[in-house]
Image (cartoon, rainbow, N blue to C red):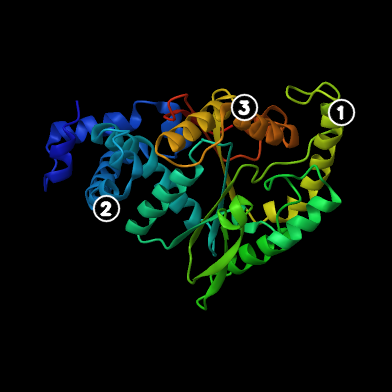
Amino acid sequence: MIDWPYVLNTTQLAVDQQSALASLLLKDRNRAQALHLPIDQVHELVRQQWQLLRSVYPQLRQHYPPIAHGLVNESDLCLSLWTLWMPLARLMSLWRQQLSRPLIVGIVGGQGTGKTTLSNLISLLLGHMGYASLSISLDDLYKTYADRQRLQQQDPRLKWRGPPGTHDVSLGIQTLDQLRLGCSRPIAIPRFDKSAYDGIGERTSPEYVSNIEIVLFEGWFVGVQPVDPSKFVDAPEPIRTAQDRQFARDMNDRLREYLPLWERIDRLLVLNPVDYRLSKQWRQQAERERIAAGGHGMSNDEVEQFVHYFWRALHPELFISPLIQNHSRADLVLDVNPDHSYGKVYKP
């Protein structure tokens, strides 16, 4: 049993607590192996993580939304930090050390898998470890409002932003190329305001950064590869009609435009729901909470139409599943449970 208040406040770990913390790290051997934890140097790792935990926890406790909203208790937060988030930040630092330039980590996952939360937590931890990091989303690369209006006139099926074709791939390539150089001069990072034009969205002022060492590049189809078009002959729901299958084929073709962007990614992390249909449940829950708080939100039927639209474009069974199979190009997979906690952590 870990006495987390003691761990956080003591200036010297007792032997029993040090052993308990080491046991926690090594309890899941598959996870420990996937995260490249040094089993033969576990006590040194405990010391390093303990110091990091004590350093970062006050800031995390103040700014981590689930704590502020009472959605997670401090013991569970400490456990997640200890067994996953800090080892994951350490792994990324090891990946960075293997390169002679900044590291680009792709993070792919559907709605509700926690891409943004994970990116923010890892960035915070990396900062305390001495690494300048940056989070950028595929959403930040959307084409301008005017360009997307013209695109919709050309192809009315693109009624929502998000599918392949709605992003400025050249802008993404240019941005990642500049970041990979590790420039000391300021680099303009594109940002996107989803609330502009009554939710249609528009680019906003860029963020300027320099000397970035680790980039977290997240999005719902980051790193996803085109599939054999024959996959759409007997495709999963909700790809039902001939029109659905044609839309899926066209989005699959447009996905090829993104391959040069994916080539800039050094490592790929997959947030994989144990059931892809959980994304719809999570979005419906989020919309209900937004409405209950007095805000605007979609009904359950509207959420279903919205989510099914994206599944018709790039269905998780057809495009995410190949990323988590043996010998895929994913470097790490985190299974996401129905309660948003993480299950298995493994290398495909």
**Please, what is the three-letter code of the amino acid marked with disc 1?**
Ser
The residue that appears at 64% across and 33% down in the rendered structure is 307
**Please, what is the three-letter code of the amino acid marked with disc 2?**
Gln
Place of residue 63 in the rendered image (x, y in percent of width and height, measured from the top left): 31, 50
Is 253 on the left-hand or right-hand side of 327?
right
Provide the secondary structure element on which disc 2 rests: helix
The residue that appears at 69% across and 27% down in the rendered structure is 317
Is 144 on the left-hand or right-hand side of 52?
right
Provide the secondary structure element on which disc 3 rests: helix
Mark 3 or 2 closer to N-term? 2
Rendered image quadrant of residue 143:
bottom right
Place of residue 102 in the rendered image (x, y in percent of width and height, measured from the top left): 53, 62
Mark 1 or 2 closer to N-term? 2
Judging by the rendered image, the residue that carries numbered circle 2 is 59
Provide the secondary structure element on which disc 1 rests: helix
Looking at the picture, does residue 224 appear above or below residue 193?
above
